[in-house]
């Protein structure tokens, strides 16, 4: 089933290419048709026990990074990491093509996203999402070079947990936007750290943080997501 | 005399096909949000040497590094085996999400790279890169390091002045956010006395008393804890 789905668009592409080609075959120097359009499929799996991931955002861009370890988070990253809203990052000027799932990705669930672009030359892929039962935890891929992927090629990655460093990890009632709390998302105020780092994990009330709305259920460890990138055409 | 010995060594290495001298840049980044690294040791050595082995007891020199940050013992051993070593490239502690750079000219045959530094605040935790094969091809390589426990001291998580000496129970210092006081101690035993993956700090949420002097929202981490970027010229 999957195979036939895959072959049909390829066949269409070949036909279209042929119909546009008025030159006699003898004049064709390179028999390999140059794809006029590149498409990649991103499959993301939520590997956590009970951390829904905010709508998964994916973007192709030639420049820039969604985050830099040791640097202050951009405002767009802070909005994503504290409230799960990816529109600011996906709306950055450098972004050439973008896509997002409509709803959060539940623990154990899988989502597929497609990105099309004229060419993959110089393109970098970023994937971004928040662990919604945290104060400002996020995960994803940051400006991964996909420019040399050939059609049919597949790459697999796992993602790590990062902390935006913009909101203290109090885990207190009213500070976490996910279903564990239903509290506040983005708040422009920044904590003293104000640097992106790797996430130290959530503590939770079961593990000694008495004021936490989180429990052992919400703990996670690296990696957070499994990601498969496939160049479809 | 010296020249003759060196040429003999070089001759035997060429015969066995060992790697030639290389010029390396080694960047170490602290990925954590709240853990400091004591002076870092970066060393290129022969493949028959190891600074530590998981599942085996720590050497006295490794213990001194892991419990108090001292590089004296390891440096002496490395000098004895003609390793190429840089100590303390950061000129002191490497703060959370900070980076430091070491430049290393390796001699023929010193084709393995090892890196260690104590993690503060821990009892005997350290970052470790263990006899990593230096690629012969020029390029930039990324390696992520885990946190190890030397297995030589119980993780009581109590900050005690002067406890950096091997065999003296306690954490010698807690840079950054001030630690708690008057903890009762998390544990007094170390059941696994072999070098193993660190189970992480526990911490608690009490500034005074509780089990631990560490804070559970500040002093925990998830692996990996350090990123090493090696540029082979």
Image (cartoon, rainbow, N blue to C red):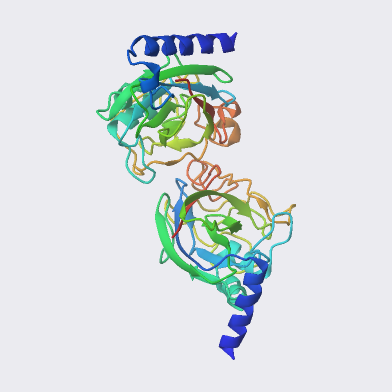
Q: Nearer the viewer, residue A68 or A167?
A: A68
Q: Is residue A54 toward the left or the right of residue B156 in the image?
A: left
Write the residue at 42% across / 28% down: A127
| A18 in relation to B74, above or below | above
Residue B45 visible to the viewer:
yes
Residue that lies at the very extreme toward the front in this rendered image: A26
Location of residue B64 (image quadrant): bottom right
Q: Nearer the viewer, residue A88 or A61?
A: A61
Q: Position of residue A170 (x, y in %)?
A: 44, 34
| A53 in relation to A136, above or below | above
Residue that lies at the very extreme toward the left in this rendered image: A93
Q: Position of residue B140 (x, y in %)?
A: 45, 52
Which image quadrant: the N terminus of chain B?
bottom right
| B154 in relation to B32, above or below | below
Q: Nearer the viewer, residue B73 or A19?
A: A19
Q: Position of residue B172 (x, y in %)?
A: 54, 62
| B165 in relation to A124, above or below | below
Q: Nearer the viewer, residue A14 or B99?
A: A14
Which image quadrant: the C terminus of chain B?
bottom left
Write the residue at 56% across / 34% down: A223
Q: Position of residue B17 (x, y in %)?
A: 64, 65
Residue B163 visible to the viewer:
no
Q: Is residue B159 toward the left or the right of residue A196 in the image?
A: right
Residue that lies at the very extreme toward the bottom in this rendered image: B1
């Amino acid at each position: 089933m999957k195979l036939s789905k895959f072959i049909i668009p390829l066949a269409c592409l070949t036909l279209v290419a042929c119909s546009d080609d008025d030159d006699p075959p003898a004049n064709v120097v390179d028999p390999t048709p140059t794809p006029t359009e590149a498409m990649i499929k991103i499959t993301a799996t939520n590997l956590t026990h009970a951390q829904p991931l905010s709508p998964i955002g994916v973007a192709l861009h030639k420049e820039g990074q969604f985050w830099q370890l040791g640097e202050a988070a951009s405002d767009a990253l802070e909005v994503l990491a504290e409230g799960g809203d990816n529109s600011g990052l996906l709306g950055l000027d450098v972004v050439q093509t973008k896509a997002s799932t409509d709803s959060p990705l539940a623990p154990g669930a899988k989502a597929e996203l497609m990105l099309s672009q004229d060419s993959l030359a110089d393109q970098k892929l970023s994937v971004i999402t928040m662990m919604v039962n945290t104060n400002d935890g996020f995960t994803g891929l940051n400006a991964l070079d996909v420019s040399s992927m050939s059609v049919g090629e597949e790459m697999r990655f796992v993602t790590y947990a990062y902390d935006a460093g913009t909101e203290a990890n109090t885990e207190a009632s009213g500070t976490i936007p996910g279903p564990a709390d239903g509290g506040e998302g983005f708040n422009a105020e920044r904590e003293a750290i104000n640097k992106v780092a790797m996430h130290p994990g959530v503590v939770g009330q079961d593990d000694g943080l008495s004021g936490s709305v989180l429990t052992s259920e919400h703990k996670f460890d690296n990696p957070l997501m499994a990601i498969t990138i496939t160049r479809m055409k | 005399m010296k020249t003759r010995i060196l040429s003999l060594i070089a001759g035997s290495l060429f015969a066995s096909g060992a790697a030639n001298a290389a010029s390396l840049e080694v960047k170490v980044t602290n990925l954590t949000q709240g853990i400091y690294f004591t002076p870092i040791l970066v060393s290129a050595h022969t493949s028959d040497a190891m600074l530590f082995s998981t599942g085996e007891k720590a050497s006295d020199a490794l213990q001194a590094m892991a419990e108090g940050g001292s590089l004296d013992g390891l440096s002496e051993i490395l000098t004895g085996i003609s390793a190429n070593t840089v100590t303390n490239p950061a000129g002191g502690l490497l703060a959370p999400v900070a980076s430091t750079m070491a430049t290393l000219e390796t001699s023929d045959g010193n084709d393995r790279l090892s890196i260690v530094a104590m993690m503060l605040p821990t009892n005997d935790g350290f970052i470790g890169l263990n006899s990593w094969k230096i690629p012969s091809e020029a390029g930039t390589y990324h390696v992520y390091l885990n946190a190890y426990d030397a297995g030589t001291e119980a993780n009581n998580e109590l900050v005690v002045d002067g406890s950096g000496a091997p065999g003296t129970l306690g954490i010698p210092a807690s840079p950054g956010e001030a630690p708690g006081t008057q903890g009762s101690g998390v544990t007094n035993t170390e059941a696994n006395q072999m070098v193993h993956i660190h189970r992480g700090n526990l911490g608690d949420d009490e500034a005074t008393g509780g089990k631990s002097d560490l804070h559970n929202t500040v002093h925990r981490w998830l692996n990996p804890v350090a990123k090493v970027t090696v540029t082979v010229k």
